[in-house]
Image: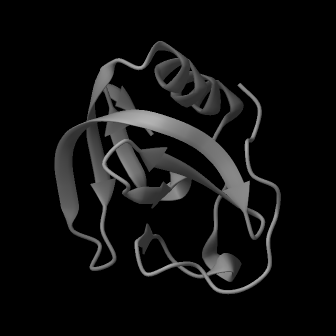
Amino acid sequence: MKHSKSDTTGSPSNSTLGNSLSNYEPIACHLYDELESAAVTGKECAIQYKNSQQQIVEIEDRIADVFQENKQEFILLKSGVKIRLDQLVKINGVNF
């Protein structure tokens, strides 16, 4: 699966979970591959991530897309939640 959205300009939406562009830390390639695989299979995932208050949130959802926006990488969940990749803690038991 390739990035489905191209870089855009403007500020991130209110539903985006993550810090400013200057603080973005890209994830390892093998972890990115895990996310793309989960998006392709459409299976329900156990997801842990840090919210905007840096609290760990645990949810179960499906990954709809993995994409780049404003030089940052995100996943979009079927529920509509968008999470910046460096805010992920664990997906399906895999530590990020």
Percent coordinates x, y for residue 15 in the rendering: 40, 72
User: Could you tell me which residue is drawn at 82 percent across and 63 percent down?
Assistant: 7
Please determine whether, in this image, residue 45 is positioned above or below residue 8: above
Percent coordinates x, y for residue 89 in the rendering: 35, 46
**Colour scheme in use:** one colour
User: Could you tell me which residue is drawn at 64 percent across and 86 percent down?
Assistant: 11
- Residue 52 placement: quadrant: bottom left
Percent coordinates x, y for residue 35 in the rendering: 53, 30
User: Could you tell me which residue is drawn at 67 percent across and 47 percent down?
Assistant: 67
Q: Is residue 12 left or right of residue 57?
A: right
User: Could you tell me which residue is drawn at 38 percent across and 55 percent down?
Assistant: 80
Please determine whether, in this image, residue 32 is positioned above or below residue 66: above
Please determine whether, in this image, residue 91 is positioned above or below residue 49: above
For the N terminus, which image quadrant?
top right
Q: Nearer the viewer, residue 20 or 5?
A: 5
- Residue 92 placement: quadrant: top left
For the C terminus, which image quadrant?
top left
- Residue 29 placement: quadrant: top right
